[in-house]
Image (spheres, rainbow, N blue to C red):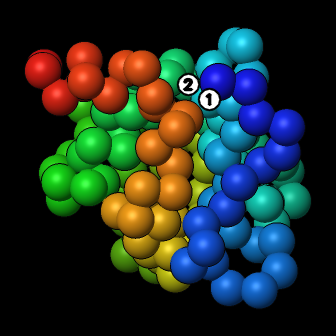
Amino acid sequence: MLESAWQKSSYCGEGDACVNVTADTTGVRLTESSDPDGHILHTTPYAFASLICSLKDGTPSPDIAVTRTADGLVRIGAVVTTTAEKWDAFVLGVRAGEFDHFGQGVRSLVRQT
């Protein structure tokens, strides 16, 4: 599960201002690359796989809360904030399978619960 660099959705526009994901031996990390404070959501592969399954199914994730605000922002796990446009690009990438490898090995466990 080691990743050498942050990955963004191919649906994200030009530049680096996107929702990005990476993984290392301690877990999966998600951030909004244009966040000036550099907030990073650090989670387990299981919780990330649960988020991926929920986004594909169009259901709320039991492990990572995703909240849309009235002013058009999206809060991910109360740590990372992004725009609806960037989040929607990330979700399109999720639905296309671009981030499945971050939850590889635990996705089948998530589907059983």
Residue 112 in the image: above or below residue 37: above
Give the percent coordinates (x, y) of residue 18: 69, 68
Q: Which of 17 and 100 is in front in this view?
A: 100
Q: How far apart are marks 1 and 2 (CA)?
A: 5 Å
Q: Which of 12 and 107 is in front in this view?
A: 107
Disc 1 is placed on an element classified as strand
Indicate the quadrant containing the N terminus: top left, top right, bottom left or bottom right: top right
Q: What residue did someone put label 2 on?
A: 43
Tags 1 and 2 in contact by the CB under 8 Å rule?
yes
Q: How crowded is mark 1: few (under 14 residues within 10 Å), some or many (20 or more)?
A: many
Give the percent coordinates (x, y) of residue 66: 38, 50
Residue 100: in sight, yes or no? yes
Question: Which amino acid is tagged 2?
Answer: Thr
Q: What residue did someone put label 1 on?
A: 28
Task: For marks 1 and 2, give the one nearer the viewer.
Answer: 1
Q: In screen coordinates, is 68 left or right of 102? A: left
Please name the residue shown 75% across and 43% down the image: 39
Residue 67 in the image: above or below residue 13: above
Q: In screen coordinates, is 39 left or right of 89? A: right
Give the percent coordinates (x, y) of residue 102: 54, 35
Quadrant for residue 48, please give it: top left
Give the percent coordinates (x, y) of residue 52: 37, 45
Please name the residue shown 25% across and 46% down the image: 54
Please name the residue shown 51% across and 75% down the image: 89
